[in-house]
Amino acid sequence: WSSRDGTFIHLQVPNGLWTGIAPLASSESEHFEYPVAQWGHTGAKGDTFSNHSGKAGGGGFPIENGSPLEGKYHYFDFPTRGKVWYSSLADMKAAVTSSRSNLTKLSQATSYRAGIYDKIQD
C-alpha cells in the first residue's frame, strides 16, 4: 500500500505527501502481486482523498446459490460511500496478477457497480 494503489503507483513529492496516482511504468522492476479486480478513485482536480470515490475496499463474498447472481463476487467501497461492486468469479480466476510476467500481460476482471433496491410492498 505504501507504494501502490492496485495497479497504479503513488506520485510523491520530496516531503513524502502523495499527490496522485499514475499507471505502472513499462520498466517496472519490483515484484508485486496485483489485485484480480479494482475500481478507480475518480474526482475533480484538487479534490482531497476524502472527497472522491473510494476510500478502501472491503472484503467480499461469492454468490453460489443458484440465483441470477450466481458466479459473481460482491465487494464494497468502505467506509462512507456505501457502493457495492461485483466481478465475475470466472474472470477473477483467469486474471494475470503477477508482475513477474511481462507487465503488458497483466489482466483483471472488470468491476461493475451493483444496484441495491428495496422493493416496498403496498
Image (cartoon, rainbow, N blue to C red):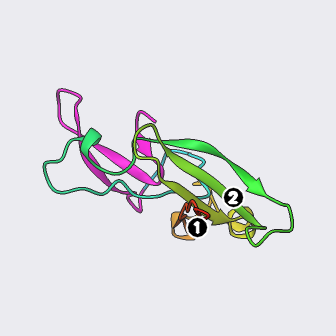
Residue 14 pos. (x, y %): 17, 31
- Look at label 1 and name its amino acid: Ser
Q: Residue furthest top?
A: 15
Q: Residue furthest front?
A: 122
Residue 104 pos. (x, y %): 51, 70
Q: Which element carries disc 1, helix, strand or loop?
A: loop
Residue 121 on the magenta segment: no
Task: Locate residue 48: give its quadrant.
Answer: top left
- Look at label 2 and name its amino acid: Tyr
Residue 16 on the magenta segment: yes
**Quadrant (top left, top right, bottom left, bottom right) of the C terminus:** bottom right
Q: Earlier in the sequence, mark 2 or mark 1?
A: 2
Task: Locate residue 49: give its quadrant.
Answer: top left
Q: Which mark is residue 28?
A: none
Determine contact: label 2, label 1, CB under 8 Å. no
Range of residues picked out in magenta = 1-27
Q: Nearer the viewer, residue 50 or 11?
A: 50
Residue 29 pos. (x, y %): 47, 49
Q: Residue at label 2?
A: 73
Q: Are there few (<14), some (14-19), or many (20+) residues within 10 Å of tag 1?
A: some
Q: Which element carries disc 2, helix, strand or loop?
A: strand
Residue 98 pos. (x, y %): 62, 54
| Residue at 57% over, 65% down | 106
Q: Residue at label 1?
A: 107
The correct choice, above or below, for 16 with respect to 40 in the image is: above
Mark 2 or 1, closer to the camera: 2
| Residue at 62% over, 57% down | 36
Q: Is residue 45 left or right of residue 68?
A: left
